Each structure stands twice: as C-alpha cells, then as structure tokens.
Amino acid sequence: MTPRVLIVEDESLLVMVLEDLLPELGYEVVATAHSVETALQAADAHAPDLAILDINLAGDASFPIADELDRRGIPYLFASGYGRSALPPRHADALLVRKPFGRQDLVDGLARLPRRNAARA
C-alpha cells in the first residue's frame, strides 16, 4: 500500500517540489495545507499515513498539528530552517529535516519514521 502524505507548508514553491518528489519516492500526496486550521481539516478529511510539517506557518507554530497527529498515532517529521532548539519539550524527540534539504535528506528522514499505529480510517 502506498503511504499517504499530508504536506503542511506555507511556501508554495516547496509544496510544489514535494508534490513532484514524493510520488517519485513511492508516496502519495493526499493533501497540502498552509495553516494549522487547514492542516487539521485535511487530517480529518484524508486520513494520512504520515505528515511533513513546517514549524513556522506564516507566524503560527505547527505544534497543535503535531499534537493531534500524536493523538491519532500518525507519524510526522518537521521540515524547517529552525534547529532542534525550536521544538517544545513535548516534541523534543521528533524527527527534524533541516531546510534547505536535499532529496537524500528527505529520503533519510522519511525512512526513519515509524509506521502508523492506527488503522486507516
């Protein structure tokens, strides 16, 4: 089964790059979101198997999205120019791919994600 990905990113160019790259890597992009609200709606509507989250979404932190994904057992990684020090203690162990990242950085990060705990809704 092809893993279904939710992309949460406010930079449209990076969204387009990920939309092209992820299918090449064997993933299906089921939704993109640019804000906390749209990401939570997309998670409800599309039941992703994993997510890629930018930390800063036009000034809002994506941590409420990570909290909800944790609650649902959906693995995610942060893709951000911010370092690990930007993560709150509750997300200190989350995977982080530093921007700007290359193809192999993303491949390596995705490979380290655990499999989704919950059955697809």
Image: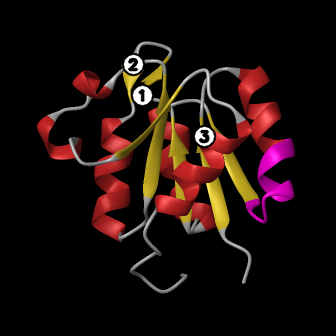
Report the amino acid beneath label 2.
Tyr
**Residue found farthest to the top:** 59
- Horizontal arrangement in the rendering, residue 45 relative to residue 16 (left or right): left
At 52% from the left edge and 30% from the top edge, which residue is drawn?
35
The residues tagged by marks 1 and 2 sit, at their Cα atoms, a distance apart of 8 Å
Task: Check disc 2 and report the residue beneath it.
Answer: 82
Range covered by the magenta-colored residues: 20-28
At 87% from the left edge and 43% from the top edge, which residue is drawn?
20
Report the amino acid beneath label 3.
Asp
Image quarter where the C terminus lies is: bottom right
Mark 3, Cα crowd under 10 Å, few <14 / some 14-19 / many 20+, is: some
Sequence-earlier tag: 3 or 1: 1
The residues tagged by marks 3 and 1 sit, at their Cα atoms, a distance apart of 17 Å
Sequence-earlier tag: 1 or 2: 1
CB-based contact (under 8 Å), mark 1 and mark 2: yes
Which-is-in-front pick, marks 3 and 1? 3
Task: Check disc 1 and report the residue beneath it.
Answer: 55
Which-is-in-front pick, marks 1 and 2? 2
Task: Check disc 3 and report the residue beneath it.
Answer: 105
Say which quarter of the image contains residue 13.
top right
Mark 2, Cα crowd under 10 Å, few <14 / some 14-19 / many 20+, is: some
Mark 1, Cα crowd under 10 Å, few <14 / some 14-19 / many 20+, is: many
At 12% from the left edge and 38% from the top edge, which residue is drawn?
89
**Residue found farthest to the left:** 89
